[in-house]
Image (cartoon, rainbow, N blue to C red):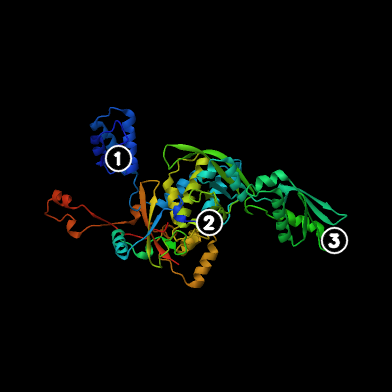
Amino acid sequence: MTDEVAGYDHVDDDVALVVQDTELPKRLREQVYEAVETREGVTVDQAAEIAQATESRYLDTRVDPLDPVGTVSAQSIGEPGTQMTMNTFHYAGVAEIDVTQGLPRLIELVDARKEPDTPMMTVHLEEEYATDRDRAHEVVWQIEATRILALGNVSTNVADMLVQVDLNEETLAERWPTVDSIDETVERVADTIADALGVETTTRGTVVEFGPSQPSYRELLQLVEQLREIVFKGIDEVSRVVIRREEVEVDGGPETREEFVLYTEGSAFGDVLTIEGVDASRSTCNNIHEIYRQLGVEAARETIINETMETLEEQGLDDVNVRHLMLVADIMTNRGTIESIGRHGISGSKESVLARAAFEVTVNHLLDAAVHGEVDDLNGVIENVIVGKPVAVGTGDVNLKMRAEQLATPGRDAREAEAESEPGVEAEPVDADD
Amino acid sequence: MVDVTQHELVPEHRLLGEDEIEEMLTEYDVKRTNLPKIKRTDPATPDDAELGDVVEIVRDSRTTDRAIIYRLVVS
């Protein structure tokens, strides 16, 4: 039992016992120990008082039965949302990469867009690569798409009907660090061009030449256009990679070490995870669908929480309780896939016709329901607001019943009757669908 | 293929035995179909999971130490 306080100098076993006597969960117990630790010389009685005060606050903050948590979450995210900036593009705190932020990003997340406006990945490296800049760059060139304009100059020789590519030796050596000779690299580039465009290529030193099979000015220009599209190395979707040296925690502990972390513009999470040197256990991306495909619903849920929380924090709205975001993420991943909040997702798949009609495109929903002869059981909140019945949350879902014999009968002592008449409170469980 | 269980975003997934499922369902007083779902094709679903099985997921929770939740395997 006392292992918990092993790391503290001013927390003894007696204090530990009074703290453990409360209903506090471990994380709060640790905070109490820390409070005792920093104050030094706290007596057991004082510690007990601290623990009890904390406990009563903790019990107060627990959700009451029948609390409309969904509505509270919606309000708690919605209100700070009104303070968010409308301008989308801003350089995020980390790396010089454009990332959608603020309200548009939040909407994008809860709408579960297939592709975020600005997809990006955070790629962590395995130790050997993470501490060595050259090795880290090896990974960078495996990820960043290399197109012809990055490798050299392209010119068209109209007289001979040839496209000439003058490759830059330095760039070649940099982007293919594992290939021994420049000639071999040039050969590879030439082969890639030949395969992609279906032309014969000839190489002279670092110059690669090719042309259309029949002399045609139009085809020549077309070849140049196509040449620009070819990806010689790296991943098509990733247009840019930024490499940064960062402090990273070792095993979540207080110790940190410096390592290189890659930030990418564009994402192809599945491809990146398989690249050698990439730490497949820490790398992430901001596309929740890619996370879902590669790592499953649970990881997607985590990512939704992380991304929404980061979006809010970035805007200085970090006092939104994470529980609200957890609830949103739970609902979005409840059916084993990612569903959006809204007409095409959660709200659109509600049981009640009236609830769906109240959300968006009212007429369509009512018409469809009429055509299919749907019945509304009036179990949810919205339906009951519409028809003017009490809603089934909070006190609206509690029925008070009193037994006949509890009524004061003539001749009976009134005080006696009063003592007996604690009304039985019954709460009928109702499927909460909001 | 990458081992997804190693990723820090993926909590521990464990297949429950039939008696454990019964115990859990009685404890929470729910039906099997009331549980949240997980696809059998989900990368994190244990390989030998079949439709109707229940997966126990132990999350490293943001609000307590660990949060245990259950998901029903669906197609």
In the rendered structure, the answer to whether residue A310 lies left or right of residue A197 reads left
In the rendered structure, the answer to whether residue A342 lies left or right of residue A184 reads left
Mark 2 belongs to chain: A
Nearer the observer, A319 or A123:
A123
Q: In this view, does A321 lie above or below A409?
A: above
| Residue A403 image offset from top left, x and y in percent | 20, 59
Label disc, if present, on residue A83 of the rendered structure: none
In the rendered structure, the answer to whether residue A297 lies left or right of residue B22 reads right
Residue corresponding to mark 3: A216
Label 1: state its secondary structure. helix
Name the mark nearer the viewer: 1 or 2.
1
Closer to the N terminus: mark 1 or mark 2?
1
| Residue A226 image offset from top left, x and y in percent | 74, 57
Residue corresponding to mark 1: A4
- The residue lying furthest to the right in this view is A159
Residue corresponding to mark 2: A289
Q: Is residue A274 in sight in this rendering?
A: yes
Q: Distance between the residues labelled 3 and 2?
A: 46 Å
Nearer the observer, A10 or A150:
A150
Determine crowd level at label 1: few under 14, some 14-19, many 20+ residues with C-alpha closer than 10 A. some
| Residue A37 image offset from top left, x and y in percent | 32, 31
Label 2: state its secondary structure. helix
Closer to the N terminus: mark 3 or mark 2?
3
- The residue positioned 48% from the left and 45% from the top of the image is A309
- The residue positioned 80% from the left and 54% from the top of the image is A163
For residue A171, what is the image quadrant? Answer: top right
| Residue A223 image offset from top left, x and y in percent | 78, 58
Mark 3 belongs to chain: A
Closer to the N terminus: mark 3 or mark 1?
1
- As shown in the figure, which amino acid type bears the numbered disc 2? His
- As shown in the figure, which amino acid type bears the numbered disc 3? Ser
Q: Distance between the residues labelled 1 and 2?
A: 40 Å
